Amino acid sequence: MQRPVKLDCRGVWKIYGPDPRRFLDRHGGAPSESDFEGSGMIGAVRDADVRIHEGEIFVIMGLSGSGKSTLVRCLSRLIEPTAGAINFEGRDLLGISPRELIDLRRKKMGMVFQHFALLPHLTVLENAAFPLEVQGVARRTREDRAREMIDLVGLSGREDYYPRQLSGGQQQRVGIARSLVAEPDLWFLDEPFSALDPLIRREMQDEFMRLQSMLRKTIVFITHDFDEAIRLADRIAVMKDGAIVQTATPEQLVLNPATDYVQEFTRHIPRAKVTRLSTIMSPGVPEGDYAGEVAGTLIVADAVRTLDADPRPFRVLDDSGAPVGTVDVAAAIDVMLGREAR
């Protein structure tokens, strides 16, 4: 069963230059690349369609300058789109008043950016509680809530530290705690880990997945790192020159790239890191001697040790727990070695 749509964005444009609305209208609402050339106009986001479901991690990725951060700022109305429609929980985000928008951001949206933007004169506790202070929440209540979030991100005992006394990873955890303190329904993260060194970045990704397993937030996550994207995402939108060129699961992107650009983008990703057992299984479960059962959602790279523990095939289960196919270690090894299925 498909989850409800939380954020629905249709035909969004963000054009920079003199009178962008007129430029868009002059070209029938869909200017081509040649229309932009020599016009002095920049199409930062071009006719973007995004539909994000409740509880999913939706990753928007692309190289620097592809438009991913601009799109996210349009989705949250931190910048005004030139054209398009954005609905949040069925509400027209572009039609609400500035006061309504501020209230929506304070109570419904959380944001974490690459640069932590902690207030240096405030402690960890005060930084985490700051969004509730802005809302006028009583001090005891907001500090109690902030302590819960600080504990959630693993910083208990550092409530009285100042940002300068924390490592980069710890500062980012404070930023995450601050963004969660108001219990947002929609969580925007714009390259939140890219300023961290590789080891800390991996730890923060683990922490992020741990938090999501408990909180089940609807998340829009921006990154230029495809390895990070496939590790975190339910679905990925790949952007190039302001346009979304493909939206799909990590597995679909790698196995069925829609363009040469996406194919090049995903070329270095081992198929075993994205292919699910349900993709390589043999359909049907005949009578026989089976080693056990495995979930069809398991990634081959994560399941190969289990499959290798027994020479017999395993039954593959669907989301409801019903057996729908069989798989053995030979099929997994074929994927890992890049061989065609036998």
Image (cartoon, rainbow, N blue to C red):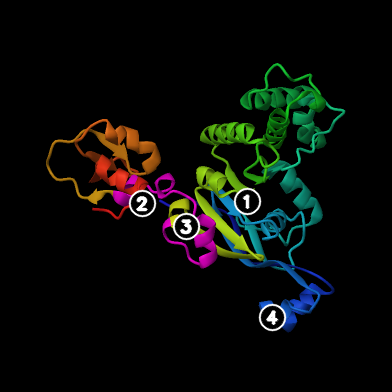
Graded by Cα atoms within 10 Å as few (under 14), some (14 to 19) or many (20 or more), the crowding at tag 2 reads: few
For marks 4 and 2, give the CA distance: 41 Å
Graded by Cα atoms within 10 Å as few (under 14), some (14 to 19) or many (20 or more), the crowding at tag 4 reads: few
For marks 2 and 3, give the CA distance: 16 Å
Residue 3 is situated, as x and y percent measured from the top left of the image, at: 47, 50
Q: Nearer the viewer, mark 2 or mark 3?
A: 2
User: Element type at marker 2?
Assistant: loop
Is residue 33 positioned above or below 303 on the image?
below
Who's the residue at 74% across and 78% down the image?
37
On the image, numbered disc 2 is attached to which residue? Answer: 338
Q: Earlier in the sequence, mark 1 or mark 3?
A: 1
Residue type pointed to by label 3: Leu
Contact between labelled residues 1 and 4, with CB atoms less than 8 Å apart: no
For marks 4 and 1, give the CA distance: 27 Å
Q: Nearer the viewer, mark 1 or mark 2?
A: 2
Residue type pointed to by label 4: Ser
On the image, numbered disc 3 is attached to which residue? Answer: 253
On the image, numbered disc 4 is attached to which residue? Answer: 34
Q: Is residue 14 left or right of residue 297?
A: right
Contact between labelled residues 3 and 2, with CB atoms less than 8 Å apart: no
On the image, numbered disc 1 is attached to which residue? Answer: 224
Residue found farthest to the right: 121
Q: Nearer the viewer, mark 4 or mark 2?
A: 2
Q: Which residues are magenta?
A: 255-280
